[in-house]
Image (cartoon, grey):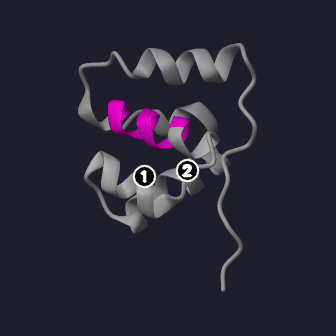
Amino acid sequence: MLPPLYVCPLSETQQQAALKQGLRCKDAFTLRRCQILLARARRIQPRDIATTVGGSVQTVCKVIRAFEQQGLACLHA
């Protein structure tokens, strides 16, 4: 079994502000990624996030891994 994926604790400044600002973005790609990352930072399970945003668990895990590797750069296609 793979270890659980978590978003690193978000600082109250840059990262969290950027993700919350992304919730108002007109670009669906950025909006969905921000929703996923903020939900995971609240420790919501990938399965529940996928149900909420209308995607798959694989997509949620892919977004979390992209954030771990790229940081906020993963918010843009």
For the point 66% across and 46% down, which residue is it? 7
Q: Which residues are magenta?
A: 30-38
Residue 6 among magenta residues? no
Task: Give the percent coordinates (x, y) of residue 40.
Answer: 57, 46
Q: Decide: is 30 above or below 1.
A: above
For the point 75% across and 23% down, which residue is it? 11
Number of numbered discs on residues: 2
Is residue 73 or residue 41 the one in the foreground?
A: 41
* Residue matched to label 1: 49
Identity, as a three-letter code, of the amino acid under mark 1: Ile
Residue 36 among magenta residues? yes
For the point 63% across and 48% down, which residue is it? 43
Task: Give the percent coordinates (x, y) of residue 75.
Answer: 45, 34
Q: Is residue 4 left or right of residue 73?
A: right
Task: Give the percent coordinates (x, y) of residue 49.
Answer: 42, 52
What SS does tag 2 mark? loop
Q: Which quadrant holds the C terminus?
A: top left
* Residue matched to label 2: 44
Q: Residue 4 lies in what quarter of the image?
A: bottom right
**Sooner in the amino-acid sequence: mark 2 or mark 1:** 2
Identity, as a three-letter code, of the amino acid under mark 2: Ile
Task: Give the percent coordinates (x, y) of residue 14.
Answer: 67, 16
Q: Are marks 2 and 1 in contact (CB under 8 Å)?
A: yes
Say which mark, if any, is on residue 31. none
Within-10-Å neighbours for mark 1: few <14, some 14–19, many 20+: many
